[in-house]
């Protein structure tokens, strides 16, 4: 069951490039965009400098998917008009019920740095 009161987010799924450049960096990587409906969104923290000397803002948000969505570490999400990068990402993001083994959903942490 999806989160009935959830909201749509855009998943930018990273697809590896076709080769490497002269420095060994991947080239030709692309993103495939998919809108995922009824996602629960929870802003977990916002950090900004307290000394007034900088303009850096770090926002961390958690996305809850049901059914489970397993993402890669280079994937990105657009949430409420802002683009976030995935923090970590692995098969461990899926919730597993210890009593019956079902996987009802997953939790993905995303982060955005500006400034």
Image: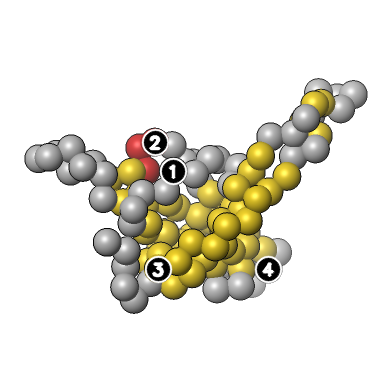
Q: CA distance from mark 2 to mark 3?
A: 21 Å
Asked if the residue at tag 4 contacts the one at tag 2, i.e. Cβ–Cβ closer than 8 Å, the answer is no
Residue position marked by numbered label 1 in the rendering: 70
| Disc 2 packing (10 Å; few <14; some 14–19; many ≥20) | few
Residue position marked by numbered label 4 in the rendering: 55
Q: CA distance from mark 1 to mark 2?
A: 6 Å
Label whose residue precedes the other's in the sequence (1 or 4): 4
Q: CA distance from mark 1 to mark 4?
A: 33 Å
Q: Is 108 positioned to the left or the right of 51 in the image?
A: left
Q: Is 18 positioned to the left or the right of 36 in the image?
A: right
Residue position marked by numbered label 3 in the rendering: 38
Q: CA distance from mark 1 to mark 3?
A: 16 Å
| Disc 3 packing (10 Å; few <14; some 14–19; many ≥20) | some
Please tell me the numbered disc located at residue 40.
none
Q: In the displayed image of the protein, which residue is found farthest to the left?
A: 99
Q: Nearer the viewer, mark 2 or mark 3?
A: 3
Q: Residue at x 73, y 44 (%)?
A: 30
Relative to 71, residue 18 above or below: above
Q: Residue at x 60, y 48 (%)?
A: 13
Residue 38 spot, x, y in % from top left: 40, 68
Q: Secondary structure at mark 1?
A: loop
Residue 43 visible? The answer is no
Label whose residue precedes the other's in the sequence (1 or 3): 3
Residue position marked by numbered label 2 in the rendering: 91
Residue 19 location, quadrant: top right
Q: Secondary structure at mark 3?
A: strand
| Disc 4 packing (10 Å; few <14; some 14–19; many ≥20) | few
Residue 86 spot, x, y in % from top left: 53, 49
Label whose residue precedes the other's in the sequence (1 or 2): 1
Q: CA distance from mark 2 to mark 4?
A: 35 Å
Residue 21 spot, x, y in % from top left: 86, 27
């Amino acid at each position: 069951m999806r989160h009935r009161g959830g909201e749509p987010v855009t998943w930018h799924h990273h697809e590896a490039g076709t080769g490497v450049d002269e420095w060994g960096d991947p080239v030709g990587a692309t993103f495939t965009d998919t809108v995922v409906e009824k996602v629960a969104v929870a802003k977990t923290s916002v950090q900004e400098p307290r000394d007034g000397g900088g303009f850096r803002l770090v926002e961390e948000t958690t996305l809850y998917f049901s059914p489970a969505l397993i993402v890669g570490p280079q994937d990105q999400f657009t949430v409420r008009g802002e683009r976030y990068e995935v923090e970590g990402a692995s098969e461990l993001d899926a919730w597993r019920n210890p009593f019956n083994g079902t996987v009802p959903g997953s939790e993905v942490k995303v982060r955005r740095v500006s400034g």
